Image: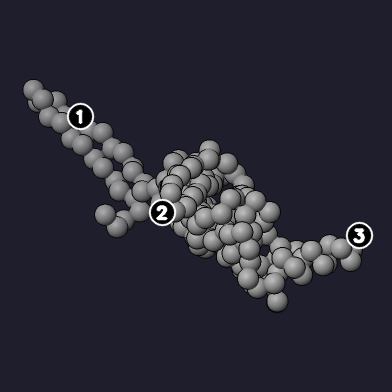
């Protein structure tokens, strides 16, 4: 079905009497927006000059955000977001979903492993987007020297 609205008319005839009922049906499309993205939380806004999205971090220390930008549903506000993740190590896989909420961002700190962030968006009538995914890697060390620079910066600041 491709139309947004349908007009339905039912007619019933019995013993010479005629009854008619009419109803307008509207298809409820889910909310729309950009893909959700997981990034290491840093002291800059991802997307601004010089601030790229980093997909690797240090276990327990680093915080990742999973952000859904520019989501809306003009016909059925408000919208809600549901976040979760799949945590994978060499020996286990754990799947977690959190409750629906109005915040378009989720923060998480993780032990070592691969973290597949997941998000879904729904409108006030319950129409849901597809489940969006983004993967980050969390390890004991980060090979780009970022941790050493961060420690040095913290030392100089205070």
Secondary structure beneath disc 3?
loop
Nearer-the-camera pick, 137 or 25: 137
Q: Quadrant of the N terminus?
A: bottom left
The residues bearing labels 1 and 2 have C-alpha atoms spaced at a distance of 42 Å
Q: Pointer 3 and pointer 2: residues touching (CB < 8 Å)? A: no
**N-term-proximal mark, 3 vs 2:** 2
Nearer-the-camera pick, 48 or 71: 48
Mark 2 crowdedness (10 Å alpha carbons): few <14, some 14-19, many ≥20: few
Rendering coords of residue 130 (x, y %): 41, 53
Say which residue label 3 marks. Answer: 158
The residues bearing labels 1 and 3 have C-alpha atoms spaced at a distance of 82 Å
Secondary structure beneath disc 1?
strand
Which label lies toward us, 1 or 2? 2
Rendering coords of residue 38 (x, y %): 57, 60
Above or below residue 79? Residue 54 is below
Residue 75: in sight, yes or no?
no
Image position of 126 (left or right of 104):
left
Q: Quadrant of the C terminus?
A: bottom right
Which label lies toward us, 1 or 3? 3
Q: Pointer 1 and pointer 2: residues touching (CB < 8 Å)? A: no
Residue placed furthest toward the bottom: 49
Residue 143: in sight, yes or no?
yes
Above or below residue 15? Residue 75 is below
**N-term-proximal mark, 1 vs 3:** 1
Picture residue at 36% right of the left edge, 48% below the top: 27
Picture residue at 51% right of the left edge, 47% below the top: 84
Say which residue label 1 marks. Answer: 19
Mark 1 crowdedness (10 Å alpha carbons): few <14, some 14-19, many ≥20: few
Rendering coords of residue 63 (x, y %): 66, 54
The residues bearing labels 3 and 2 have C-alpha atoms spaced at a distance of 46 Å
Say which residue label 2 marks. Answer: 130
């Amino acid at each position: 079905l491709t139309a947004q609205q349908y007009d339905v008319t039912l007619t019933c005839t019995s013993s010479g009497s005629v009854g008619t009922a009419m109803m307008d049906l509207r298809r409820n499309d889910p909310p729309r927006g950009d893909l959700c993205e997981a990034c290491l939380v840093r002291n800059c806004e991802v997307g601004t000059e010089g601030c790229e999205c980093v997909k690797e971090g240090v276990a327990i220390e680093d915080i990742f955000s999973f952000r859904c930008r520019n989501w809306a549903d003009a016909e059925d506000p408000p919208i809600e977001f549901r976040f979760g993740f799949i945590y994978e190590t060499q020996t286990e896989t754990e799947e977690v979903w959190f409750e629906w909420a109005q915040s378009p961002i989720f923060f998480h700190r993780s032990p070592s492993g691969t973290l597949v962030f997941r998000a879904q968006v729904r409108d006030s009538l319950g129409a849901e987007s597809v489940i969006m995914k983004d993967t980050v890697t969390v390890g004991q060390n980060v090979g780009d020297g970022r941790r050493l620079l961060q420690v040095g910066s913290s030392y100089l600041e205070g």
